[in-house]
Image: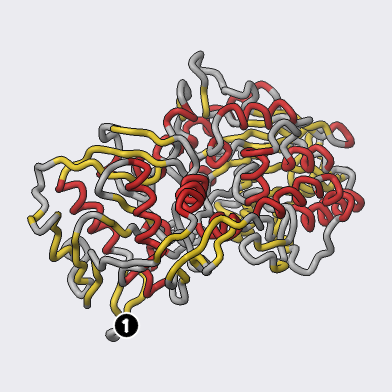
Amino acid sequence: MNSITITILETSDIHGNIFPINYGSNETVGLGLGKIATVIKQERSRNRNTILIDNGDLIQGTPLTYHYVRSNNHKQNPMITLLNDLNYDAAVIGNHEFNYGMEVLQKAIKESDFPWLSANILNEKGEPFIGKPYILVELEDGVKAAILGVTTHYIPNWENPEYIKGFTFDDAFESTKKWVEEIRKQENPDVMIVSYHGGFEADLETGQPTEKQTGENQGYRICEEIEGIDLLLTGHQHRSLAGKVNGVPIVQPSFNGQAIGKVTLTLTKNNDRWTISDSNPELIFVNEIEMDESSLQLVKEYEAVTQEWLDQPIGKVIGNMTIEDPLKARIKDHPLVEFINKVQMDVAKVSISNTALFNNVTKGFPTNITMRDIVSNYIYPNTLTVIRISGKDIKEALERSASYFMVENGDVTVNPSFTTPKPQHYNYDMWEGINYIFDISKPIGKRVIELSLKGDPIQHDEEYDVVMNNYRAGGGGEYIMFKDKPIIKDIPLDMSELIANYILERGTIEATVDENWKVIW
C-alpha cells in the first residue's frame, strides 16, 4: 500500500491586483498577485504534485487593468503575463471577465498558455463558448485529477447585454451535476475538482439560507446534492472560507489577492485504486509575505504608465466634495453623489438619475482633481443605461434602498443584509431629479413617505425615463423592478471616462446640494 499527497492552490477574485498598492493614495497594502506568486513558488518547491487554478474575476478591478484596456491593449494582458509565468493549470470565467467586452476577454483567452473553463456558458451552438468544460491533469504514480469549471449563471442580471450577446447561461448547479456524472463515467478520475465562480447561499454548518435564493450562489446545494465531488473551489462572494460541507473540502480565498486557497489531499492506493484518505482545506494570507520581484518585473512597465496616467490633473472643485462619514453621506444629500448624478443626467439627456457610493473607503474629490481621484471614487467599469419605468417601479426601488437602514436605540445602522456575508453598500441608491423622504422608523417596505416630481406626486402608472448604471438597469442588487424594462438609450463609455470628460470640458466644478431627498427617523 502506498500514498501520495496532492496540493491544490486556488486564487479567486484577484480583480487586477498585482502590486501591493491602494491606487487611490499609493499607500502600501498587504495584498496582490506579486505576494501570492511567492506562496505559489514555495508550495511548488515543497510538492511537485501541485495543481494551480484561478477561479475567476481576474482581469478587471484596478486602474492598472483599466488603463491597459483603455490605452495599452496592443500588448499582452498583464494578468495573463503573470499567470503564464506562474504556470497556472487552468482558469475559470468569472462574471467580471465580461466587463470590458468580448474583444478584451477573447484576447486574454487567446494569450493564455493555460485553458479557460466554463461548462455552463454556452454559445449559439449550445457548446461551452471557450471550448473546454473540464480538463484532466496527470500527476505522479498515474494519479488523474479532473477539473470542472462552472460560473454563476446570474451574469445576465448584471452585464451589458451587448457583451454577452448570443450566450446562454445554464443553471450552474444543474450543469455541475451533469458534468460530474459524465466525467466520472467517461474519465474515471482519481480526484474530481469543481472550480465554481460562485459562493454559498446557506450557512455552512446549519444549512440555513443566508440570502435570497436567486441562484446566484449555489455552493451549499452543490456539496449537499451532487455525488462524486472531492473538492469545491469557490469565489465571487469575497469571503475567507476554509472547511467542509457534507464532507466535501471547500475554500474561498477572500479577494484582491489577500489570500490563496490551499487544499492538501492524501491519496492511498488499495487494490489498484486511489482513494482520498485525508483532506486539509486552509487559507494562506499574504499580508506579511514578501513580493516575488521576478513576477513584478514582468509588468513594471504597465505599472509605470498607469501611475503617470493617474497623476494627470483633470480640474478643480469649488467647495467641499470630500466624504468624511460614508453613513452620513447616505442619510443626507451629498455633493459627490449629486455631482455623479448630474454627470449621468447630462450625458444621457434625461432629468432623473440614481447612483450609489460603492464602498466605505471612498474619499470624494479634493480641490485639485487627478485621474487617480476619479478611478478611486468610481471603481467599476460601468456604462450607463436609460430605461423607461413606471412611478410604481420608482417607489419599489426606493423602498429597496430604504431597507438599507436600521434604527437601534435611536442610532442609524446598516441592515446586515447589505453587509453580510459580503458588503453591498453599492446596492443603496440615491436619486436626483425627484423629491423623496425615507422614514426609517417605519417597517421595511413602507418607508417612502413622500415622492414627488416638480411639486406633483409621482403617479404609479406614469412612465419616466431614468439613467442608471448598467448593473442596476439589468436588475442587479435585487432591483428586479428594473429588469427587462424598455431600454431607451445605452451609453457605451465607462463612467470614469464620462466623469473625466465632464470635468475636463469645464475645468472647474462646484460642490452643490439641492437637498431633494432626506432620511428621517
Q: Nearer the viewer, residue 5 or 508?
A: 508
Residue found 67% across the figure and 28% down from its top: 107
Residue at point 57% right, 43% down?
A: 197
Residue 282 appears in view = no
**Outermost residue toward the top?**
125
Quadrant showing the N terminus? top right
- Residue type pointed to by label 1: Asp
Residue 188, percent from left and from top: 70, 27
Please indicate whether residue 98 sits to the left or right of residue 287 in the image: left
Colour mapping = secondary structure
Residue, x 35% and y 61% (percent of image)? 338
Residue at the far bottom in the pictured view: 409
Q: Is residue 321 above or below residue 255?
A: below
The residue that disc 1 covers is 411
Which of 19/13 is in front? 19
The secondary structure type at the circle numbered 1 is: strand
441 sits left or right of 32 in the view:
left
Q: Position of residue 233 (x, y in %)?
A: 63, 46
Q: Which quadrant holds residue 100? A: top right
Q: Can you tell which quarter of the image residue 267 is in? A: top right
Q: Residues within 10 Å of mark 1 (few under 14, many from 20)?
A: few
User: 23 or 198, which lies in front?
Assistant: 23
Q: Is residue 314 visible?
A: yes
Snapshot quadrant of residue 4: top right
Taking the image as shown, residue 404 lies to the left or right of residue 17, namely: left
Residue sitting at x 78%, y 32%: 137
**Farthest residue toward the right?**
45
The location of residue 180, given as percent across then percent down, is 59, 31
Q: Is residue 76 or residue 392 the one in the foreground?
A: 76
Q: Quadrant of the C terminus?
A: bottom left
Q: Could you tell whether 239 is left or right of 231 in the image?
A: left
- Rendering coords of residue 428 (x, y %): 35, 59
